């Protein structure tokens, strides 16, 4: 029985019939930028300007921090959890932070390992971007780390796929969407790499990041981890081109909260060539998340200063308490053992210092154990917990 080809816009790409016992059609995306070119109507122009201003403010607030890396540790982990939740993992931010305290048992290990791999992949990518352009080589390196160990380790980490994959359904013949066949993966990725490197012409960074993400999702070049890596492309492109100085833009929160709209907007690119609709959705997310990030960062700076002032009233105990407070600002969840090893404090001093911070009302014990106790910076975690689940303490 013959099957009819799914209807896709030539502006987005074309289909190719794949022969076999059950024939099916693959989608092969057209190279970017689209033809005809993007239509910058008033709405799209206004959204682009709003998103650009919001990113500028986010970077400015971050620059006010005495230590620019201060929020990065926990923000990266928040993005990792949210991006993995979109793919179906049940791990929470608290699970990840507890997991990173090696002596803390009882968290869902498979899920949290996937999230931990995302953190490692993001941090690795940021480091490599300082010496290597954003390229297919780097994308493969990042993917290898993303899928190391855990459930994805048998799905060719760091290698572009050599077999057909699909989205939805039990096989290509009944799938909701079938990406390019294996022989078209590298040509499609090569065209995407050229677009990222401004060939044949320069595309504004904000627009480029959004279009590259959508195109990567359509190519789906790996057997697993495409969604997570595709979302990583957005901050990587922005950082590579100087639009952001650090990845404090966690778009996965927006995509998670509007998951149906997210997938529908991507589908409309393929079905109608509606790049403008996708970019409007994406730019609204950039603006919204960057504005929320600026507001949250400003509140956190004020909160840190307030708590530091309270610690200064502890007398002689303030010296070790200030050190632990600095560590909590970066780590949020700490075991007594971690405090000792990171700060060189004795076990009794670490215990006593954490008790002082508890008495001030912003640190809580979360393990419920008499030994190997774990503490959290409660109001900091609450500020980061919006849109997520699983708050300790």
Image (cartoon, rainbow, N blue to C red):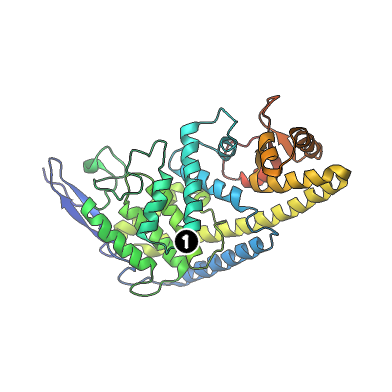
Relative to 202, residue 321 above or below: above
Q: Quadrant of the C terminus?
A: top right
Residue in the picture at 25% in, 53% down: 180
Residue 387 at x, y percent in the picture: 57, 44
Name the residue tied to disc 1: 129
Residue 338 at x, y percent in the picture: 66, 38
Relative to 63, residue 258 above or below: above
Relative to 227, residue 291 above or below: below
Q: Outermost residue toward the top?
A: 370
Q: Quadrant of the N terminus?
A: top left
Residue 373 at x, y percent in the picture: 68, 30
Relative to 253, residue 30 above or below: below
Question: For this rendering, which residue is in front, 267 or 167?
Answer: 167
Res 63 quadrant in image: bottom right
Residue 161 appears left or right of 74: left
Q: Secondary structure at mark 1?
A: loop
Q: Outermost residue toward the left?
A: 1
Q: Outermost residue toward the bottom?
A: 201
Res 362 quadrant in image: top right
């Amino acid at each position: 029985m013959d099957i009819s080809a799914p209807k896709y816009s030539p502006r987005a790409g074309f289909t190719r019939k794949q022969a076999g016992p059950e024939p099916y059609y693959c989608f092969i995306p057209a190279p970017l930028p689209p033809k005809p070119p993007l239509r910058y109507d008033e709405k799209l122009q206004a959204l682009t300007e709003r998103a650009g201003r919001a990113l500028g403010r986010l970077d400015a607030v971050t620059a006010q921090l005495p230590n620019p890396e201060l929020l990065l540790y926990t923000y990266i982990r928040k993005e990792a959890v949210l991006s993995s939740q979109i793919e179906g993992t049940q791990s929470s931010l608290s699970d990840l932070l507890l997991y990173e305290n090696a002596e803390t048992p009882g968290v869902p290990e498979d899920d949290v390992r996937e999230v931990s791999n995302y953190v490692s992949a993001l941090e690795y990518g940021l480091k490599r971007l300082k010496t290597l352009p954003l390229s297919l080589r780097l994308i493969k390196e990042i993917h290898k780390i993303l899928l190391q160990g855990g459930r994805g380790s048998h799905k060719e980490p760091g290698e572009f796929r050599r077999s057909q994959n699909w989205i939805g359904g039990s096989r290509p013949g009944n799938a909701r969407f079938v990406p390019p066949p294996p022989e078209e993966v590298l040509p499609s990725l090569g065209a995407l790499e050229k677009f990222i490197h401004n060939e044949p012409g320069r595309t504004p960074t904000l627009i480029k990041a959004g279009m590259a993400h959508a195109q990567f999702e359509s190519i789906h070049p790996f057997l697993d981890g495409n969604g997570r890596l595709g979302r990583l492309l957005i901050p990587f492109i922005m950082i590579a081109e100087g639009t952001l100085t650090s990845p404090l833009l966690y778009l996965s929160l927006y995509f998670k909260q509007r998951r149906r709209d997210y997938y529908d907007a991507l589908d409309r690119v393929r079905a109608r060539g509606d790049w403008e609709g996708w970019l409007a959705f994406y730019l609204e997310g950039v603006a919204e998340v960057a504005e929320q990030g600026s507001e949250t960062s400003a509140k956190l700076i004020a909160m840190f200063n307030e708590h530091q002032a309270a610690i200064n009233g502890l007398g002689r105990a303030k010296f070790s308490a200030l050190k632990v407070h600095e560590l909590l600002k970066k780590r949020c969840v700490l075991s007594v053992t971690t405090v000792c090893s990171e700060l060189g404090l004795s076990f009794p001093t670490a215990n006593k210092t954490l008790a002082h911070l508890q008495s001030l009302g912003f640190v809580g014990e979360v393990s419920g154990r008499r030994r190997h106790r774990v503490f959290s910076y409660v109001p900091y975690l609450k500020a980061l917990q919006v849109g997520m689940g699983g708050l300790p303490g």
